[in-house]
């Protein structure tokens, strides 16, 4: 008969929040960490490209990893093609009448992406024609968007805390939910049967999908819970908060398994690597923290000259796309605004 082991972590203490588990203790770097550190020693180059004429709000890779899209305060989206070890700008997508605050790609079609804008529309674009194939009018200024894993639905959140679910084929609204709290980032789980929202009270709200009935509300952080991402393997999700902590959650148990606490400023963005083993997180700190997911150990840090807003790991390779604010008060910092950066390139490239 197997001997049951005592549970560990916050759940063992009768709580699900990250407060009980700040630091992980491990007996030295894992083989994975040592291997990736060796790789990054030879691939620590960051290349930057001018993508926009103003601050970049969002970066995202197509599912096949061939293209990177960016959305900007300049009301446009840009798409780059990844050719070996460099990004080549292909097209600029114009049409929105206000800032493009977030964008995302279709989960399985590498030619389609969708943009959310403050102009009260979302637009679906096809990179083969470089044209907008659909404009969907919404009720408010849109700030968050995600595409369901099955590709059938697009969810968009606005500044009035309304989330609208739009049929990706007919471009019509299927459902609409008004929330009584500040809605930050939104996401489906990988199985497409639950919908997650991070909110201004530090909670993660979970709804069943497609019924949109409340399943659970988790007190995740003592302050504003800003961002959420699911790992590609479906084992964990991570949230970033204004308390400068990143917390890692078990998808099935909905308990916090560990925290990452190397940043000092509110965590604005997180991203899992393609193998689910690395977690990048960024804030107004002038570095991006790259941690090993299973231990919380620091694996690498990417130096930045100013606060970082979006980060996105490539879906197949250890390449990290990101963009910086360019507003840290330095005289020449404006040159940062509008650039997209790519870390993980060979040092001799």
Image (cartoon, grey):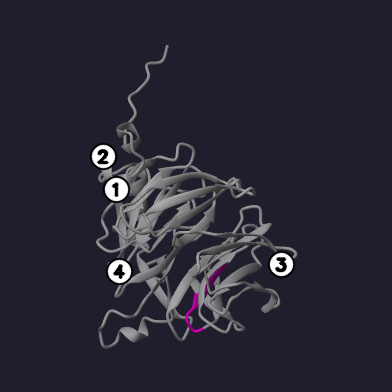
Q: Based on the picture, tell me whether residue 73 belongs to the magenta stretch.
A: yes
Q: Residue at x 53, y 82 (%)?
A: 98
Separation (CA) of disc 1 from disc 4: 21 Å
Separation (CA) of disc 2 from disc 3: 50 Å
Q: Nearer the viewer, residue 142 or 36?
A: 142
- Image quarter of residue 283: bottom left
Q: Residue at x 37, y 54 (%)?
A: 202
The disc label shown at residue 171, or none = 3
Q: Residues in magenta? A: 67-74
Q: Earlier in the sequence, mark 2 or mark 3?
A: 2
Q: Residue at x 49, y 55 (%)?
A: 197
Contact flag, marks 1 and 2 (Cβ < 8 Å): yes
Q: Earlier in the sequence, mark 1 or mark 3?
A: 3
Q: Position of residue 221 (x, y in %)?
A: 33, 51
Q: Return the residue at label 1.
A: 297
Q: Earlier in the sequence, mark 1 or mark 2?
A: 2
Q: State whether the magenta stretch is mostly helix, strand or loop.
A: strand
Q: Return the residue at label 2.
A: 26
Q: Position of residue 238 (x, y in %)?
A: 41, 51
């Amino acid at each position: 008969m197997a001997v049951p082991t005592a549970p560990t972590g916050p759940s063992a203490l009768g709580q699900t929040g990250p407060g009980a588990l700040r630091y992980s203790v491990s007996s030295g770097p894992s083989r994975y960490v040592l291997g990736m550190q060796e790789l990054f020693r030879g691939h620590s180059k960051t290349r930057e490209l001018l993508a926009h004429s103003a601050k970049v709000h969002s970066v995202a890779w197509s599912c096949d990893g061939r293209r990177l899209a960016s959305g900007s305060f300049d009301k446009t989206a840009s798409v780059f093609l990844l050719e070996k070890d460099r990004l080549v700008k292909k097209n600029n997508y114009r049409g929105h009448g206000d800032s493009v605050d977030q964008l995302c790609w279709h989960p399985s079609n590498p030619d389609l992406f969708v943009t959310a804008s403050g102009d009260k529309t979302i637009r679906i674009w096809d990179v083969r024609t470089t044209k907008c194939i659909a404009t969907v009018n919404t009720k408010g200024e849109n700030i968050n968007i995600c595409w369901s894993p099955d590709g059938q639905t697009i969810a968009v959140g606005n500044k009035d805390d309304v989330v609208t679910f739009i049929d990706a084929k007919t471009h019509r609204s299927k459902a609409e939910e008004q929330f009584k709290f500040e809605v930050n980032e939104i996401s489906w789980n990988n199985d497409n049967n639950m919908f997650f929202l991070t909110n201004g009270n530090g909670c993660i709200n979970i709804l069943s999908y497609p019924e949109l009935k409340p399943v659970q509300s988790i007190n995740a952080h003592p302050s504003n819970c800003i961002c959420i991402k699911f790992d590609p393997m479906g084992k964990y999700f991570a949230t970033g908060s204004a308390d400068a902590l990143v917390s890692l959650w078990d998808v099935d148990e909905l308990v916090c398994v560990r925290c990452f606490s190397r940043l000092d400023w509110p965590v604005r963005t997180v991203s899992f690597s393609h193998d689910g083993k690395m977690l990048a997180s960024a804030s107004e700190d002038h570095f991006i923290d790259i941690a090993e997911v299973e231990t919380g150990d620091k694996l690498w840090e990417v130096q930045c000259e100013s606060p970082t807003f979006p980060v996105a790991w490539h879906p197949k390779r250890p390449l990290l796309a990101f963009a910086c604010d360019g507003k840290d008060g330095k005289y020449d910092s404006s040159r940062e605004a509008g650039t997209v950066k790519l870390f993980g390139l060979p040092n001799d490239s």
